[in-house]
């Protein structure tokens, strides 16, 4: 291993796990988390005594109800883990920050096997009501209405209370600059739904047509209901191990080739310099700076679809299609289908398989690299997977490979 | 039909940092912090100029004119009882990298366009003058 080699290459994903995923499962977040964690530990051929690191995104007590999942101390205590390294937090290059931190901890020798998890119970939290805005906005009037500080003071007075509103700006601007159409945008949702039909754990599996998409309820133009991901309950976990362990792992280890973590523009939803890219531009650029692989090596892409437009941004910024041309690229859906040029969001993404918040994308990338996708396995066995999570000023990405780099 | 915004105007919490901005409309003009050394506008408010780092930022009046950089027409009932309203992102005429999230008013949702010139007006709620923008005529620009 050369001294110049990116340190993340000393890390592999040796095990993966996922709890039941669904709408209003009626189970606690810790219960779901332990299912995912124990599965990942067993999948890695380890026992909990082997786990000496623990990381999560975003850590307890942040965001709207059901967003955060249990804290790392709760999980550590429930499993009585003896840890050499632990981490949990929100700030950083998107949801995958916990995985990146784990890779670096392993590379630095702070831990050998790091359990990393992300849990959501947003479906149960939402109950029968509508989806919440950020900051508890909505409802109430007259005296006692809270006032807002920080970033939210600039958006909430205008009813820009959800990421849906801010991300709609991206889509609208792309329509203006690149001529993106709703019919093109629809392909992200239609592709996800087609793949979800082959995933028994997906939330929405019934077929969806372009007409269904175009007639769906508008949320915030040009984003309709099917451009927004599906809140769910579920937990995903992986074990990030030192590469030395790979030969001993019972399943093929997924090697971390490069991580992308940059944020070179302003960290703001309304002040970022290029509204058509946001920081996916920076994260992707910094990832390619750390590898000899090139975009044409990517055999499967699991690209964050909290909103459909974000997947199109990632497609371009990762270089999987030319800048500004993701609309024509996805037209008709052939190129992004399971047997297409670049199979995309093969489990149904968050749009149809559930909002597992970035970790679902990473889990599915490992499934595909191992060849365990069953009915949804990409027929041309991928050797390299691109995983991206986040949108707006929050973004991170990584390349995983089937064998050592 | 035109709307001015959500059914309930949730308000900023005023402090010594942001009060100049949210009360600026009291005399009918919009103000941003401007650096006395490099003359750039800086927004949101910070203690020092983000460009030249001088400790020389003071609120200064701007023309109140700008251009719609992007927009969305919100339909979702995040705030119950709201008719569809336009959430605009406006670049101020004085400097390309200073933007405001706002509502575009006096404009039907189907008429708003990127590049549309707009001008500020204010809606008072308690001790806050909320800047809103209305179509101003003139030539569109990106």
Image: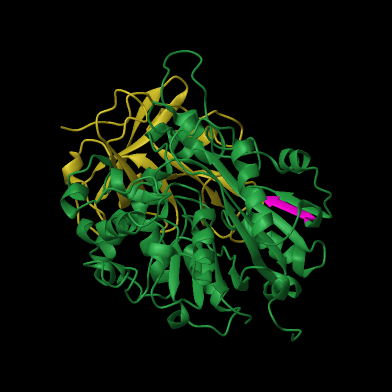
Left or right of A135? Residue A140 is left
Start-end of magenta stretch: A51-56
Q: Nearer the viewer, residue A168 or A30?
A: A30
Q: Residue at x 44, y 68 (%)?
A: A301
Q: Please say whether residue B108 is visible from this viewpoint.
A: yes
Question: Residue A327: image x %, image y %?
Answer: 27, 66
Quadrant for residue A177, please give it.
bottom left
Question: Residue A34: image x %, image y %?
Answer: 65, 43
Q: Colour of chain A?
A: green
Q: Quadrant of the N terminus of chain B?
A: top left
Relative to B128, does residue A265 appear above or below in the rendering? Answer: below
Residue at the outermost top position: A143
The secondary structure that dominates the magenta segment is strand
Q: Residue at x 82, y 67 (%)?
A: A109
Question: Residue A53: image x %, image y %?
Answer: 77, 55
Question: Residue B126: image x %, image y %?
Answer: 44, 19
Left or right of A162? Residue B103 is left
Q: Is residue A4 magenta?
A: no
Q: Residue at x 53, y 32 (%)?
A: A65
Q: Nearer the viewer, residue A100 or A115?
A: A115
Q: Nearer the viewer, residue B67 or B32?
A: B67
Relative to A306, does residue A4 appear above or below in the rendering? Answer: below
Q: Colour of chain B?
A: yellow
Left or right of A284? Residue A86 is right
Q: Nearer the viewer, residue A126 or B11?
A: A126
């Amino acid at each position: 291993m050369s001294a110049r080699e990116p340190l993340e290459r000393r890390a592999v994903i040796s095990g993966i796990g996922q709890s039941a995923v669904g709408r209003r499962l009626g189970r606690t977040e810790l219960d779901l988390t332990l299912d995912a964690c124990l599965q990942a530990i067993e999948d890695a051929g380890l026992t909990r005594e082997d786990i000496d690191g623990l990381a999560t995104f975003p850590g307890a007590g942040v965001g709207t109800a059901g967003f955060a999942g249990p804290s790392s101390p709760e999980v550590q205590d429930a499993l009585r883990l003896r840890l050499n390294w632990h981490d949990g937090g929100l700030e950083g290059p998107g949801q995958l920050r916990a995985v990146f931190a784990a890779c670096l901890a392993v590379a630095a020798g702070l831990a050998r096997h790091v359990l990393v998890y992300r849990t959501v119970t947003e479906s149960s939290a939402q109950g029968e009501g509508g989806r919440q805005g950020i900051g508890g906005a909505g409802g109430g009037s007259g005296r006692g209405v809270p006032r807002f500080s920080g970033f939210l003071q600039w958006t909430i007075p205008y009813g820009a209370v959800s990421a849906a509103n801010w991300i709609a700006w991206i889509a609208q601007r792309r329509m203006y600059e690149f001529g993106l159409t709703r019919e093109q945008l629809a392909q992200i949702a239609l592709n996800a739904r087609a793949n979800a039909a082959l995933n028994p754990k997906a939330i929405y599996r019934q077929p969806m047509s372009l007409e269904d998409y175009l007639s769906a309820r508008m949320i915030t133009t040009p984003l309709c209901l099917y451009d927004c991901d599906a809140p769910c309950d579920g937990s995903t976990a992986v074990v990030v191990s030192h590469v030395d362990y790979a030969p001993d792992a019972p399943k093929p280890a997924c090697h971390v080739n490069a991580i992308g973590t940059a944020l070179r523009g302003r960290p703001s939803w309304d002040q970022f310099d290029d509204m058509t890219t946001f920081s996916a531009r920076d994260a992707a650029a910094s990832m390619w700076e750390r590898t000899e692989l090139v975009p044409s090596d990517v055999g499967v892409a699991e690209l964050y679809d909290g909103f459909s437009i974000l997947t199109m941004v990632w497609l371009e910024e990762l270089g999987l299609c030319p800048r500004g041309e993701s609309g024509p690229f996805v037209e008709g859906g052939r190129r992004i289908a399971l047997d297409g040029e670049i199979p995309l969001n093969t489990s149904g993404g968050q749009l149809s398989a559930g909002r597992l918040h970035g970790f679902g994308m990473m889990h599915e990338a490992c499934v595909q690299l191992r060849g365990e996708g069953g009915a949804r396995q990409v027929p041309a066995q991928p050797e390299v997977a691109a995983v991206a999570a986040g949108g707006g000023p929050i973004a991170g990405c990584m390349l995983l490979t089937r064998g050592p780099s | 039909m035109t709307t001015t915004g959500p059914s309930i105007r949730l308000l900023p919490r005023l402090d010594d940092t942001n009060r100049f901005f949210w009360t600026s409309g009291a005399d009918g003009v919009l103000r941003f912090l401007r650096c006395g050394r490099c003359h750039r506008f800086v927004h949101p408010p910070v203690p020092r100029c983000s460009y030249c780092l001088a400790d020389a930022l003071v609120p200064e009046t701007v023309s109140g004119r700008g251009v719609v950089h992007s927009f969305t027409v919100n339909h979702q009932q995040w705030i119950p009882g709201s008719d569809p309203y336009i959430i605009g992102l406006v670049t101020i005429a004085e400097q390309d990298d200073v933007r405001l999230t706002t509502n575009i008013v006096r404009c039907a949702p189907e008429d708003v366009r990127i590049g549309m010139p707009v001008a500020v007006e204010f809606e008072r709620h308690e001790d806050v003058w909320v800047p809103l923008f209305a179509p101003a005529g003139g030539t569109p620009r990106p």
